Structures are given as C-alpha cells and as structure tokens.
Image: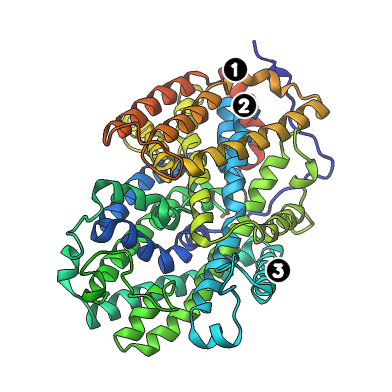
Amino acid sequence: MSNLVDHQPPVHPEHGHLRREVGFYGLMFVSLGSIIGSGWLLGALNAAETAGPASIISWVLAAAMLTVLALVYAELGGAYPVAGGSGRFPYFSHGPLAGFTAGWASWLQAVAIAPIEILAAITYVNSISWVNENFPMLNATGPNAGLLNGSGLVVASLGMVLFTAVNLAGAKFMSDSNVIVVLWKTAVPLLTIVVIAALSFHPSNFHSGGGFAPYGVHGIFAALPAGVVFALQGFEQAVQLAGEARDPKKDMSRAIIVAMAIGALLYILLQVVFIGAVEPSHVAHGWSNPLGGGPSDYGAYYTIALAVGAGWLAKVLIIDAVVSPAGTGIVYVGTTARISYALGEEREMPGILSTVDRRGVPVVSILVTAVVGLLCFGPFPSWNKLVGVVTGATAIMYAFAPVSLAALHLRDGDRPRPYRMPWPKLLQPTAFVSANLIIYWGGFEYTWKIACALLVGLLIFGIGSTIAQTGSLFMVRHAIWIGPWIGGQVIIGALGRYGDGSHSLLPQWWDLVVVIAFSVVIFYWAVSCVMPRENVQEEIAKDADQIDYVAIG
C-alpha cells in the first residue's frame, strides 16, 4: 500500500473559504473573456504568415482539438467544482505529486498571460505613428529593438497594478465588470468582420502567393502554436473560479461549452476576412508580409481599416487594443491567484497562499501573481516568443485533464455529474493525443525549456515535502508516468520537424504517427496508475465543502 493513507489534509489555521457569488453569465464571460484577448488582434496575421490562406484550416483544426478538451473540462468542472481545478483534478486521481505537477504547469502558463496581454496592447498602440513619434514605448534600434523601453516599462507596470486592484475588489466585482468588457470585446471583432468584409474582400487572395497552402501541411500545423492555439485557449478559466460559482453543478459545463463555441466561430471568421481583405499585390508572391510593411505591421486590422478608408473603425480598434487585452489580463490575474490558492492547500507549499480575507478574497495569492507578472517584463523579448512558451505549458496542463477524468470514471464513477462528455472511450484518449500534438508542433526549442521549468517545480515540491515531512515523495508510483511522458516529448521534439534545434530525422507524417502512438501508450499507462478507490475518495473529501456545495434558491 502507498503511504497516501497517511497523507493528511492540509491544516492551516488561517485557511478560509472563497465566497460564492459568480453566476452562469459571469462564468461564461470569464471563459469567453479569456479566449478573446490579444489573440484576435495578432493571431490572424501570424497564422497567415505561417500557413497562408490554409491558416483557416489551422483555426478549424485547433477549434476541433480544443473543443474535445473543453468537453473534458466541462464534465470535470461540473462534477468537481473546486478552485484551481486544473491542479486539483490530477490530485484527486493520482495524488499530490501529479496534482502539483499539473498545478505548476497551469500556474506557469497562467501567470504569464497578463504580461503577454499588456505587451500586446503596448505593441499595438505603439504602431500608431503619433505615439511612436511622441511617446514611444518600445526600443526602435539596437539589441533591444522591439522590447519595452523605460516609458513602456512604466506603462506595463501600471497595467499590472490596475489588474491587481480589480481582482482585490473580489471575484464578483471582477466577473461583473468583466461582463461589460467581454460584451465590448465580442462586439468589436464582429463589427470588424462585417465592415472590412463589406469594404474589401478579394477572393483571388485565397489562391495567391503559391496557392491555398503555400507552405504545405507543415505550415498548417506550425501555425497552431504560432498564436492560433493561444488565441483559443482560456475556456478552462471558468473552472478555476468554480469555488466561487453560485451554482457550479448547473452552470459550469454550459458556461465552458458556450464560450468555446462563440470563440471558435469568431476566430475562424476573422481569419477568413483577414485573408480576403489584404491588398492582392502584397501576397502575389508570398505571405511573408501580407500587410506590405510599414510601422503598423502589428496593428493588422488597424492597418487594413485605414487602407479601406474606415478611419472610424481604426480608432475603435485602437481602443479595443487596450480593452481586449486588459479584459483578458484582469481575468488571468484572478484565475492565476486561484491556482496559487489551490497549490497552497497542499502541505508541501506555503499555507499562506490559501488564506483569504474577510471578504473571501485570496489577497496573498493575488499579490504573488502580480509580483511574478511584473518580473516577466524583464526576460521575455516579444509577444511571439512568450506565446510559444505559454502554448506549450498550456498543452501540458490540458493533457492532465483527460487522464484524470478517465481515472476518476474508474474510481469515482457513481458520482452525480451534471454533464457527461459523449463517447468517453474515444474522446478521452483523443483529447490527450490532441494536447500532445500541440506540444510537438510548438517545437523542440520550447519543449525542452518547459521540461526544465517543470523540473524546477518538482524541486520546490521535493523541498517542501521534506521540510513538512508529508511523505508525498513516497507516492511517486502513481505519478511515475509523468517523467517518461515529458522526457519522451523532448526526445520526439529533438528528432522531429518543428522548432529550432530539431533534427528532422522523422519523415513527414511518420512524425505524427510516432506522437500519436506514444500518446496513446502514455494515456493508458497513466490511467492504470490511478490511486486505489479509498485513496481517491479520501483526497476528494478534502474539498467536500466546495464539491458538495448546493446552491440555495
């Protein structure tokens, strides 16, 4: 028997409870607000440069893969409505070590989102000629070209302070204010689609510059981690707020599915409109520069709006370049703090992370998130580079969910579930394979760095376990599959065809066969490593106050 029976619930005298004030629309808009961020402003341009008109297929493929993962989260979030669910689900099924690894991956990707959104807003606004000439926020020349200068760093820091202040006001204030922001964020892309399609749409663009797929299948797949998956991710953010949902069993699954459907449709339409709107002469010989150059390259739709004579729309887009990233950044500061809160419930981590004030707000976790977010402005050179790292970490976080769901079906299958995903025997391994393909397509240059970051987290966990004498390290047999899984991804990435440092030893298509086969083997091995039923029930019982909560009225 494992020592898990001796692993007692974390005891923190100052531990508190989150306040349940967020309804269906609050949850749905939290997820949708996370999906519609800087991705819609910058994603279509990156995708078109990487895959040409075939980038439309990239969006459809990403939407299909992430929808399967969303169905997994919808079931887990409804059945186990706990704060920081991304890390807690593996904890229930595979114990503290697996739970911490998933929570660490979740925290790594989430903590960088707010800085990404701020960088996107600054980059977009900085493309305006007046701003670039009178108040530049990015270095124009030298080794730091494109990075924040002194003025940009001040603006970015003020942005983080604002995001933090909104979250310190409480989850209800954050979700209610986010509803207004998301309504704006959804309306502006829809307006952009209608106006630009009406003023400039060139069907010939869809076969210009080398045909529909000028960069072949490789380009279609490479576009996914170049901003497509990043744009569509975020549907799981409602799950992170499950501990503050008014009626999670009723609202959680609906909120996730509705948000994912709206976001996917919106992004696909945006890509179609972007391809049709660019000047045909700019793509006649290739898609490397569809906007034709100039200082507004990052302001894709802004540049197009000016080119087609819709100056009023260009002004709206600049406003949205601040509002959309700000809305997403505010959400992620809040949900990252909830992940920290969940990690703080493990005895291996400082218990102060799981404390709340008298209003039920996890103040310490929010402040930690803000400080780390501020530090992110130093080492990361651009939106594009940080997006690659975040996409890989997100895919690892996503991959834990179908493993946990399949394992919990075995050990806790009789639990009432407000929503059950269809065809679980097929879609659960499909979801795991989808996450692994996203990791592979992200490229070796990011996979090995993410693996190193996970090792740092495990070192922290090991130190915490030793100091607290929890015995968690003796439960490694339930998480033994994680090492070979991540290590195998690094090796396949090195042998594969994506990213700097890869050796292209695996032939095209055969590389995908290898990733899929490897993923299927790991999935069933991981599910077989599930803890015994009594241990699973014991771990779930530690969050019974959240899971068994019943809404009144």
Direction from residue 190 to residue 107 in the image, left or right: right
Residue wearing tag 1: 477
Q: Nearer the viewer, mark 2 or mark 1?
A: 1
Q: Which residue is mark 2?
A: 95
Q: Which mark is residue 161?
A: 3
Element class at badge 3 = helix
Decide if residue 547 is in sight here: no
**Which mark is in front, 3 or 2?**
3
Residue found 58% across the figure and 20% down from its top: 478
Q: With 284 as the anchor, is 192 left or right in this view?
A: right
> What is the crowding at mark 1: few (fewer than 14 residues within 10 Å), some, or many (at least 20)?
some
Q: Residue at x 53, y 38 (%)?
A: 448
Residue 76 or residue 328, whichever sits in front: 328
**Which SS class for mark 2?**
loop
Q: Observer-nearest residue: 68 or 227?
A: 227
Hey, what amino acid is under mark 1? Arg
Q: Nearer the viewer, residue 268 or 242?
A: 268
Q: Is residue 72 above or below residue 316?
A: above
- The answer to whether 106 is drawn above or below residue 48 in the figure is above
Mark 2 or mark 1: which comes first in sequence?
A: 2
Quadrant location of residue 382? bottom right
How many residues crowd around disc 3 within 10 Å: few (fewer than 14), some, or many (20 or more)?
some
In this rendering, position of residue 453 left or right of residue 394: right
Say which amino acid is labelled 2.
Gly
